[in-house]
Every structure is written in structure tokens, then in C-alpha cells.
Image (cartoon, rainbow, N blue to C red):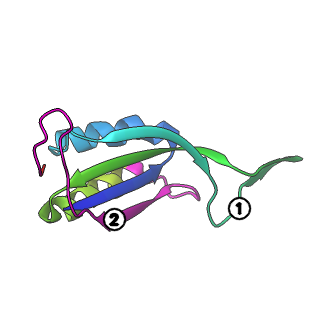
Amino acid sequence: MKMIRAIVRPEKSDEVVEALSQAGCVALTKMDVVGRGKQKGIQVGSVYYDELPKVMLMIVTEDEKVNEITDVIMKTAYTGNYGDGKIFISPVEEVYTVRTGEKGL
């Protein structure tokens, strides 16, 4: 199993979630976050924004579905501008359902 954490623009998050749903990925966690990338913020006129709003999507999936899910995110979140986001993929050793105590997805 893998955990996919995708940081995307807030204005693209609903579109990404809908595309993931259509691709069969229904379980995810979505949260508002702030951060900065390689540009270290953005300057608009005389105002400097050190951290920018983003949305983080967290998805745990079987190894075989990782490429499909990352492709959907990459295509849907893309604008071609700085700040489109990042995708992080990490191994998941175990998963438990709190309500039932069941192990696994």
C-alpha cells in the first residue's frame, strides 16, 4: 500500500477530487494548508506573501493504482504556472478501521 499526498492549488482541488472520483478513487482526506515552494512565496506589487494557501489531498491505495491516481492528479491540477503543486508517495505498513478493528483497506 502507498499513501499519496498531493498539494494542489485551491481553485483546482474540487476538479481534482471529481476526477479522482470518476477514476474510482472515492476515499480521500482533503485539508486546507499553507506553504511555500521553491519561489519562497510571491510578491504582488509592494506586498510579499511568504506562505500561500493550498489544498492537501491524502489517499491510501494499493500499489497497482498509484500510477493511475498520480496521472489523474497531474493532468487535472496542471495550469503550467509556478505553484501547481507536488505529489509525495510513501509506503504504508498497516491500516486499521477504527470502528471495526479490521486490518487492511
Q: Image height check: is 55 above or below 94?
A: above
Residue in the foreground of this view, choosing between 46 and 86 = 86
In the image as oriented, which residue stretches furthest toward the front?
Answer: 101
Image x and y of residue 45, in percent: 85, 46
Residue range highlighted in magenta: 77-103
Marks 1 and 2 sit apart, C-alpha to C-alpha, by 23 Å
Residue in the foreground of this view, choosing between 14 and 2 = 2
Image x and y of residue 100, in percent: 12, 35
Q: Which mark is residue 89?
A: 2
Instruction: Name the residue: 39% across, 39% down.
Output: 30
Q: Is residue 99 magenta?
A: yes
> What residue is pinned by disc 1?
40
Instruction: Name the residue: 89% across, 47% down.
Output: 46
Instruction: Name the residue: 34% across, 40% down.
Output: 29
- SS majority, magenta: loop
Whichever of callouts 1 and 2 sits on the residue coming sooner in the sequence is 1
At label 2, counting other C-alpha atoms closer than 10 Å, the crowd grade (few under 14, some 14-19, many 20 or more) is: some
Q: Which mark is residue 13?
A: none
Label 2, secondary structure: give it.
strand
Q: Is residue 98 magenta?
A: yes
